[in-house]
Image (cartoon, grey):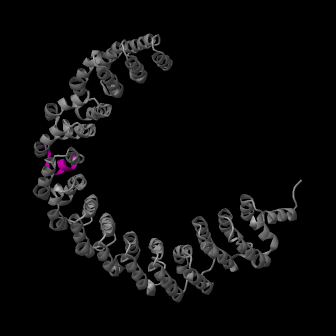
């Protein structure tokens, strides 16, 4: 039997009086049913005041109330009467439970999009004054979020009142309020009338001198947002705030400024960059705190792309030298970026000023520092040329190839394609081929696998014939090696590169090797043979070679190992 509307309302009202919290919260979520039944006047005069009786209720009920209030918009009469709902939300914003306050703020935002703030300006100003005068912390925190939402539609006088209230929040004795105000400052930008712009900039200055560095850090983001919105022609009044933050006593603030310098450079005029930002980068590269120097090094290249080469030569390059003897993480960051500076200053200046620094880095005792230079070899090649560079890097490269850390060896191996392309096949054979072959049988799988992938790239540089004669033939000799890992490396080498070999080499050398390794005494080798056959079978065109691979699969289908048999049977189905 379906309940009548009257019965449904009666049940809902009973649930609102229930001691069962989930039942009461669910009834609160459906309060619009009561609102629709009462009509506009009774909803405004009876239901909304009735909701205030629940303000001391459980958190779950209060959150449900905060979330349902915007849904009462039509119940109270729509746009012309919706402001009455804000009074209840104001009280919910004062609740100590933060989830309740958060839900109330969210509903505030939702309702403000449908209310004419200019029409009800006096009511709004009264409300925000009450919230500002409240003794409850959450009321002030909520106000920090609400004020930017209403200011755009207010009169210049109303905007002045709002900014005065916001000023009291920015200077509040509670750092939590000041931080919340700082986080919401950026939402005022572009919304105030021109006559209030100076007032807004004063507020930014107050945030920038806050005694808490956590607030001043937010001021950096606020300042960048302000620069972005006002544009190059109107930002001169913001420069004092930038200079103040640039010289902040907290390294965290200076670090963030250093990290954001390219962003500031992109929204400043050229004369501002020359007069302030270039000197700021130079200052940060020499900062007392290594974290600030690291941040400056990290953004050095991005910043230098936005200034002239003359400015780099005059203000940046002279302060770089101390960085090569800095603490490890500063040196590493600098080493990762120095090569990228070369195209920005040209070949002659790179050779004169940057190359000596690179050579000094390559003489560093730390392999991790040296390897940073090899991460951008192409950049060095493009400036100083292959012949000069080979003499520069060879001592360090040979030393790094002997390093005990597998990541260092892998990084060196990944340089081989570029080195081969730039230095030629004869130089590569003499200096790098022995290292490559050694890496192929390294004790760490990641090195062996990485070198195999490097060899795949070398096919495009030296051609299949060179790979076959200088690498593959030597690899094939390991098929009967006593060391298991070498035989496994060989079969995985074949699996990765089989499709790159010439047809003659594949049929004459690779396939016979695969067939021979099918009788290996280690099951895992035989299992990988099955996988290789399955992978290359479709690429083989020679009928006799295909038959030999099928014979190998049939033999492995009778293998003593169950896994080998299982995969061999699957491969036979694929190969037909």
Residue 347 is situated, as x and y percent measured from the top left of the image, at 14, 55
Q: Is residue 168 above or below residue 467?
A: below
Q: Relative to residue 278, is residue 256 drawn left or right?
A: right
Q: Which residues are magenta?
A: 377-386
Residue 211, quarter of the rendered image? bottom left
Query: Is residue 381 rendered magenta in the image?
Result: yes
Residue 76 seen in the figure: no
Query: Is residue 141 rendered magenta in the image?
Result: no
Q: Is residue 400 above or below residue 523?
A: below
Residue 83 is situated, as x and y percent measured from the top left of the image, at 66, 79
Q: Nearer the viewer, residue 71 or 466?
A: 71
Q: Main secondary structure of the magenta part?
A: helix
Residue at left offset 16%, top offset 58% = 346
Residue 301, quarter of the rendered image? bottom left
Q: Nearer the viewer, residue 50 or 256?
A: 50
Q: Residue furthest bottom?
A: 157
Residue 502, quarter of the rendered image? top left
């Amino acid at each position: 039997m379906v309940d009548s509307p009257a019965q449904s309302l009666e049940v809902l009202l009973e649930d609102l009086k229930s001691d069962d919290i989930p039942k009461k919260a669910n009834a609160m979520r459906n309060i619009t049913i009561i609102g629709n039944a009462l009509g506009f006047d009774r909803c405004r005069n009876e239901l909304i005041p009735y909701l205030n009786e629940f303000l001391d209720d459980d958190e779950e009920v209060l959150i449900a109330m905060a979330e349902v209030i915007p849904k009462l918009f039509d119940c109270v009469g729509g746009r012309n009467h919706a402001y009455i709902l804000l009074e209840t939300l104001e009280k919910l914003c004062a609740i100590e439970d933060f989830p309740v306050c958060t839900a109330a703020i969210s509903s505030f935002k939702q309702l403000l999009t449908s209310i004419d703030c200019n029409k009800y300006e006096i009511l709004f100003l009264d409300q925000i004054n009450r919230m500002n005068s409240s003794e409850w912390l959450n009321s002030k925190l909520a106000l920090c979020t609400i004020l930017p939402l209403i200011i755009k539609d207010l009169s210049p006088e109303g905007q002045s009142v709002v900014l005065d209230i916001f000023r009291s929040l920015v200077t509040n004795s509670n750092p939590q309020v000041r931080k919340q105000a700082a986080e919401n400052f950026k939402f005022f930008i572009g919304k105030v009338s021109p006559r209030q712009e100076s007032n807004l900039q004063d507020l930014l200055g107050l945030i920038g001198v806050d005694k808490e560095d956590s607030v001043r850090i937010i001021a950096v983001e606020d300042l960048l947002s302000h620069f972005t919105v006002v544009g190059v022609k109107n930002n001169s009044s913001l420069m004092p705030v930038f200079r103040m933050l640039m010289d902040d006593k907290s390294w965290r603030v200076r670090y963030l400024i250093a990290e954001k310098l390219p962003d500031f450079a992109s929204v400043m005029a050229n004369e501002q960059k020359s007069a302030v930002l270039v000197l700021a980068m130079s200052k940060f590269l020499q900062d007392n705190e290594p974290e600030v120097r690291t941040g400056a090094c990290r953004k050095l290249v991005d910043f230098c792309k936005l200034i002239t080469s003359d400015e780099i030569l005059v203000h940046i390059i002279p302060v770089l030298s101390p960085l090569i003897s800095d603490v490890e993480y500063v040196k590493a960051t600098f080493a990762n970026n120095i090569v990228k500076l070369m195209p920005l200053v040209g070949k002659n200046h790179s050779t004169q000023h940057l190359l000596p620094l690179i050579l000094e880095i390559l003489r560093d005792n730390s392999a991790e520092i040296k390897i940073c230079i090899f991460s951008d070899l192409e950049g060095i090649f493009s400036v100083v040329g292959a012949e000069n560079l080979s003499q520069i890097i060879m001592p360090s490269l040979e030393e790094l190839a002997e390093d005990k850390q597998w990541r260092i060896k892998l990084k060196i191996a990944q340089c081989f394609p570029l080195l081969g392309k730039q230095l030629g096949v004869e130089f590569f054979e003499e200096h790098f081929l022995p290292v490559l072959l050694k890496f192929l049988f390294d004790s760490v799988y990641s090195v062996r696998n990485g070198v195999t992938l490097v060899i795949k790239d070398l096919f495009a540089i030296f051609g299949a014939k060179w790979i076959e004669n200088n690498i593959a033939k030597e690899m094939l000799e390991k098929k009967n090696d006593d060391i298991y890992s070498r035989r496994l490396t060989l079969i995985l080498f074949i699996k990765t590169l089989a499709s790159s070999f010439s047809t003659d080499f594949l049929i004459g050398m690779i396939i016979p090797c695969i067939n021979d390794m099918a009788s290996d005494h280690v099951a895992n080798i035989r299992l990988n043979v099955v996988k290789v056959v399955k992978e290359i079978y479709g690429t083989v065109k020679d009928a006799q070679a295909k038959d030999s691979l099928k014979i190998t699969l049939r033999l492995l289908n009778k293998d003593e190992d169950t896994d080998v048999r299982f995969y061999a049977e699957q491969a036979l189905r694929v190969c037909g």
